[in-house]
Image: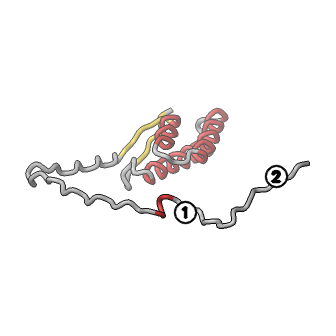
Amino acid sequence: MRWKFWQVEEEAQPVVPEEVAAPSPEPAPEPLDEPPAEQQRQPEPEPEAPAQVTLTIDEAKGVIKEAGGDVIQVGFLASAYRRNLEDDPESQETAASRKRLRELVGKRLKDRGLLASDGIVELRD
């Protein structure tokens, strides 16, 4: 194996980046001409979140996911609801799993500002 060493200069100088070495003077910002108050636009108010939403389970998951929300728990509850729906559509367990799913979807939509704080979510089949 051959070793290769760097040669050392007698009068070594520290390496100084160009940014630190000579800062360039920044030009002063030019004043912008502001339009008169009449011509300034008022920011449009954000649309209010709806008080009632009716979605399918897949639509609800898609909306929550597009808004940057987590849909893993929604997916688990949706699977449990669908399984209960296949076993016995009229059972109390099916009704309870639908209610848990509906409440979770509502909570996720409210967290993302897609549903009013006192809003209601209805799930279509």
Task: Give the labeled residue for mark 1.
Answer: 16
Most distant residue in the right direction? 1
User: Alpha-carbon neighbours of circle 2 within 10 Å: few (<14), some, or many (≥20)?
Assistant: few
Residue 91 appears anywhere in the view: no
Instruction: Tell me the SS state at disc 2.
Output: loop
Q: Is residue 112 left or right of residue 7?
A: left
Q: Is residue 88 above or below residue 19?
A: above
Amino acid on which disc 2 is placed: Lys
Q: Which mark is residue 103?
A: none
Residue 18 appears anywhere in the view: yes
Amino acid on which disc 1 is placed: Val
Rendered residue at 28%/49% (across/down): 46
Position in image of residue 79 (x %, y %): 63, 39
Q: Quadrant of residue 7?
A: bottom right
- First in residue order: circle 1 vs circle 2: 2
Rendered residue at 48%/63% (across/down): 20
Rendered residue at 75%/56% (across/down): 6
Position in image of residue 74 (x %, y %): 57, 45
Rendered residue at 29%/46% (across/down): 47
Closer to the camera in the image, 58 or 68: 68
User: Alpha-carbon neighbours of circle 1 within 10 Å: few (<14), some, or many (≥20)?
Assistant: few
Task: Give the labeled residue for mark 2.
Answer: 4
